[in-house]
Image (spheres, rainbow, N blue to C red):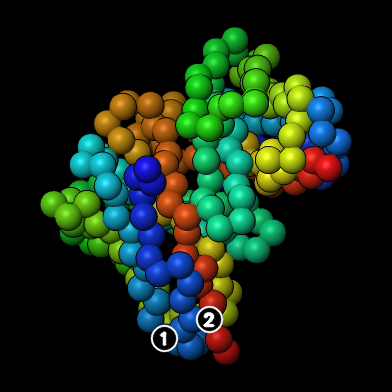
Amino acid sequence: QQKVQQSPESLIVPEGGMASLNCTSSDRNVDYFWWYRQHSGKSPKMLMSIFSNGEKEEGRFTVHLNKASLHTSLHIRDSQPSDSALYLCAATYNTNTGKLTFGDGTVLTVKP
Amino acid sequence: EAAVTQSPRNKVTVTGGNVTLSCRQTNSHNYMYWYRQDTGHGLRLIHYSYGAGNLQIGDVPDGYKATRTTQEDFFLLLELASPSQTSLYFCASSVLGGIQDTQYFGPGTRLLVL
């Protein structure tokens, strides 16, 4: 059973638009959520992480977390073609091991 | 940024063949991980290690062995490769393996089993 579910599977936004990606854990014992970005042919790179309720902003990227609903979302404003990539959500659970459980990802395409 | 290297970058083998994938990190990180990534899927954890001589079982370990010979080097072994193991393999490392630690990924090895 997949512990981390992402939606949508794919998303197309115009250049300059807002992209919103969703991620939910089916296991209540989640500690941290992570967002990784993977450009085509490259390795995943950590974008942002969040563990407390609320939001966190870094430049054009904002992450929200609602721990009660086990849901996190990533919002990219003023999207650029260079933001086109696979966005992977991952979670760590209270096992003290730091093991990441990944979702299947959202493919974002930003159209010029 | 943390440096993780993998070799080979591409590998073709036949069913039943022996394959070793290598990973090296020079960040003095304690934890190292092996993942596979298949089309339409995120990354799935095969094995991980918190130090030389240590091995922990991941979520999809069947058909794989791993060995951590030094703090820097972590190997993934496929002793009887099968077509179902055709995949993109990533190695990663993190400082202490804690829930707050960022994992840094290598460039990946693409494996094709004929």
Question: Given the image, what chain letter belongs to the residue carrying mark 1?
Answer: A
Residue B79 horizontal/vertical position (percent): 75, 22
Judging depth in this view, the residue of B12 and B114 nearest the camera is B114
Is residue A21 something that shows in the picture?
Answer: yes
Is residue B95 something that shows in the picture?
Answer: no
Tag 2, which secondary structure? strand
Do the residues under discs 1 and 2 have CB atoms within 8 angstroms?
yes
Tag 1, which secondary structure? loop
Locate the C terminus of chain A by quadrant: bottom right
Whether residue A32 sits left or right of residue B102 in the image: it is left
- What residue lies at 50% left-to-right and 19% top-to-bottom? B56
* Residue, disc 1: A17
**Amino acid type at mark 1:** Gly
**Amino acid type at mark 2:** Val
A21, above or below B7, in the image? below
- What residue lies at 42% left-to-right and 33% top-to-bottom? A99
Q: Residue furthest toward the left?
A: A68
* Residue, disc 2: A110
A49, above or below A86, in the image? above
Judging depth in this view, the residue of A1 and A96 nearest the camera is A1
